[in-house]
Image: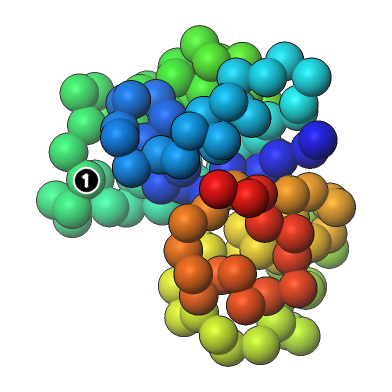
């Protein structure tokens, strides 16, 4: 499976957070799966850290890439085709980071790993918890 992680899923995985569904943890650890984190998640993490909503043990621009590499998670750049999908995306969810992640999952034919119920309204395949 090709799986794109929502930002909170990545953060829960690397911190061992009990909120991460066991099936998600197992899918991320399964080396037969291609696990990816978007640079959008790094952007979101930096902003939330800067405004004091996300404490981290290191600056996010160091911590997130280090943890991504440590756990052998790939990186997904933002591409024009994914951004263009925003024009047709229904306004079920207002968070711009989540909306772009949905567009990337759709554009690249990836399964999206999230527990955000509002994001499950989009026509994207979501990893089963």
Quadrant of the image occupied by residue 34 = top right
- Give the side of residue 75 with respect to residue 66, left or right: right
Residue 35 seen from this side: yes
Q: Provide the secondary structure element on which disc 1 rests.
A: loop
- Give the side of residue 108 with respect to residue 68, left or right: right
Residue that extends furthest to the top in the rendered view of this protein: 70
Colour scheme of the rendered structure: rainbow
Q: How busy is the neighbourhood of tag 1: few (under 14 within 10 Å), some, or many (20 plus)?
A: few
Question: Looking at the picture, does residue 78 appear above or below residue 82?
Answer: above
Q: Which residue shows up at 78% across the image and 48% down it? A: 110
- Position of the N terminus by quadrant: top right
| Closest to the observer, 63 or 17 | 17
Percent position (x, y) of residue 7?
Answer: 46, 47
Q: Which residue shows up at 56% across the image and 70% down it? A: 119
Q: How many marks?
A: 1
Quadrant of the image occupied by residue 12 = top left
Percent position (x, y) of residue 64?
Answer: 42, 28
| Closest to the observer, 73 or 22 | 22
Q: Which residue shows up at 48% across the image and 33% down it? A: 22
* Residue tagged 1: 54
Question: Looking at the picture, does residue 116 appear above or below residue 129?
Answer: below
Q: Which residue shows up at 52% across the image and 29% down it? A: 25
């Amino acid at each position: 499976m090709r799986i794109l992680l929502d930002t909170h899923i990545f953060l829960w995985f690397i911190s061992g957070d009990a909120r991460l569904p066991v099936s998600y943890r197992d899918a991320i650890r399964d080396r037969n799966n291609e696990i990816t984190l978007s640079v959008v998640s790094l952007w979101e993490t930096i902003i939330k850290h800067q405004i004091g909503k996300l404490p981290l043990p290191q600056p996010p621009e160091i911590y997130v890439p280090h943890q991504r590499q440590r756990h052998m998670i790939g990186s997904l750049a933002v591409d024009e085709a994914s951004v263009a999908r925003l024009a047709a995306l229904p306004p079920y969810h207002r968070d711009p980071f989540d909306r772009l992640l949905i567009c990337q999952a759709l554009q690249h034919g990836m399964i999206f790993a999230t527990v955000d119920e509002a994001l499950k309204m989009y026509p994207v395949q979501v990893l089963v918890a």
